Image (spheres, grey):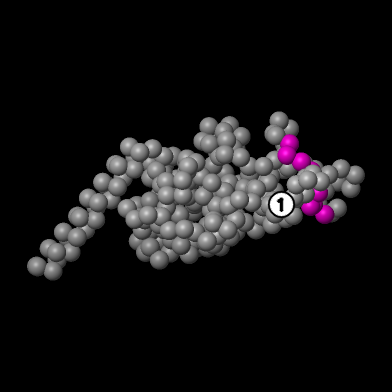
Amino acid sequence: MQGKKSDPFQKRFTNYPVLVPADPGDIDDGPAGFLLPSQAEPLETPHVHIVRKQDLKGDWLELNVSRQDCDYVIAASDLRAACRDNDRNKARKAYARLAPALKEIGVITQTGEQEMADFYSATPVWFPIHYQRLMTHAFADVRLVLWWPSPSYSTLAFYCPSWRAALMLSSVLERFRMCPCGKLFIPRTAGKLFCCPEHGSYYRLKEWRERKKAESKKIRRRSS
């Protein structure tokens, strides 16, 4: 497998914190002073929580984020992986799970989920088109803000009013990735595409075999 190409968006913005409203029991990272009076109580400034690596681990997500939102993020990550690997099977599964969301925002019009998944997964040119539209819709309420929680510290930050938006943004920033096995993991390096070395060896070998099989089919067609 070829080395992963750098993503200009990810490279440029990955160091900015992603903020969500702080709920009871969350780590309180400071006041959201950037909110306008119409977006906050007049006499009380809400506080925010920085999305940390431990917040992106599977066990934490399952306990603190709705199953619907988790499935949405996982399916979107699958569609992104299908874009990267030109994988029709992965795209078909992602489309089937994302059908309600894609219909809701008007990206697709097919009535049957399986019919839609079969139709669009057959044409890889649709993968990046639908992925960027899906993610752009998910970012509709995300704001780039100037966060100044203390006199000695200020930074640009992404403010997300919901965990779904925060998770979708974190996936684009590649703070977590989807292994081909279906597990979400936090990459330690920019080139890490698998959750463990064993899966890296397995899926690279699988990809090599599939590529050789496709090449053999082309040779047989030409000779026939």
From this viewpoint, is residue 51 visible?
Answer: yes
Q: Is residue 184 rendered magenta in the image?
A: no
Q: Position of residue 30 (x, y in %)?
A: 76, 41
Residue in view at x 37 percent, y 54 percent: 3
Q: Which residue is mark 1?
A: 155
Looking at the image, the residue that sits furthest to the left is: 224
In depth, the one of 132 and 56 nearer the eye is: 56
Q: Is residue 54 above or below residue 218?
A: above
Seen from the viewer's position, the closer of residues 17 and 106 is 17
Q: Main secondary structure of the magenta part?
A: loop
Q: Please, what is the three-letter code of the amino acid marked with disc 1?
A: Thr
Looking at the image, which residue sits at the far right?
43
Q: Viewed as shown, does residue 81 lie left or right of 10?
A: left
Q: Secondary structure at mark 1?
A: strand
Q: Residues within 10 Å of mark 1 (few under 14, many from 20)?
A: few
Q: Quadrant of the C terminus?
A: bottom left
- Kindly identify the residue that appears in the image at 51 percent across and 36 percent down: 58
The stretch of residues the image draws in magenta is 28-36
5 or 179, which is in the foreground? Answer: 5
Above or below residue 89? Residue 218 is below
Residue 97 appears in the rendering: no
Residue in view at x 69 percent, y 57 percent: 144
Quadrant of the rendered structure where residue 60 is?
top right
Q: Position of residue 19 (x, y in %)?
A: 68, 46
Quarter of the rendering containing residue 140 = bottom right
Identify the residue at image location x=65%, y=48%: 17
Query: Residue 162 location in percent, x, y?
Result: 66, 46
